[in-house]
């Protein structure tokens, strides 16, 4: 409901400023629709309660050699 009110306010403001013509109304609707679509696509979805947690994948390697840690240069895993 609120997006329709905002779109109507955009059209009304454009009509008040530029005068009433089909070009002004159409352009205001087009501009408001494109702006609304961009803001809709940029918005993040709602999270339900309990969805704030992140899943962390924990891997366990079997064996005596730490070949999986060779590519970590900056971090010391043996602390």
Image (cartoon, helix red, strand yellow):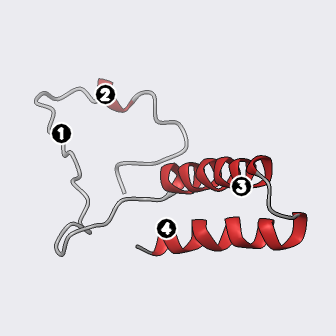
* Mark 2, other Cα within 10 Å: few <14 / some 14–19 / many ≥20: few
Compare residues 77 and 39 and report the one nearer the observer. 39
Q: Quadrant of residue 62?
A: top left
In the image, which is nearer the foreground, mark 2 or mark 1? 1
Query: Separation of disc 2 and disc 1 at Cα?
Result: 11 Å
How far across and down, in percent of the image, does residue 3 sit?
49, 68
Does label 4 or label 1 sit earlier along the sequence? 4
Location of mark 2 (residue): 68
Does label 3 or label 4 sit earlier along the sequence? 4
Location of mark 3 (residue): 25
Disc 1, SS: loop
Compare residues 37 and 46 and report the one nearer the observer. 37
Residue 39 sits above or below residue 26 on the image = below
Quadrant assignment for the N terminus? bottom left
* Mark 3, other Cα within 10 Å: few <14 / some 14–19 / many ≥20: some
Does label 2 or label 1 sit earlier along the sequence? 1
Query: Separation of disc 4 and disc 1 at Cα?
Result: 50 Å
Query: Separation of disc 3 and disc 4 at Cα?
Result: 15 Å
Residue 23 sits above or below residue 11 on the image = above
């Amino acid at each position: 409901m609120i997006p329709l009110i905002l779109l109507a306010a955009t059209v009304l403001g454009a009509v008040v400023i530029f005068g009433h013509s089909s070009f002004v109304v159409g352009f205001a609707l087009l501009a408001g629709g494109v702006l609304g679509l961009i803001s809709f696509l940029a918005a993040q979805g709602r999270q339900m309660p309990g969805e704030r947690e992140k899943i962390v994948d924990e891997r366990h390697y079997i064996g005596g050699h730490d070949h999986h840690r060779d590519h970590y240069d900056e971090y010391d895993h043996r602390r």
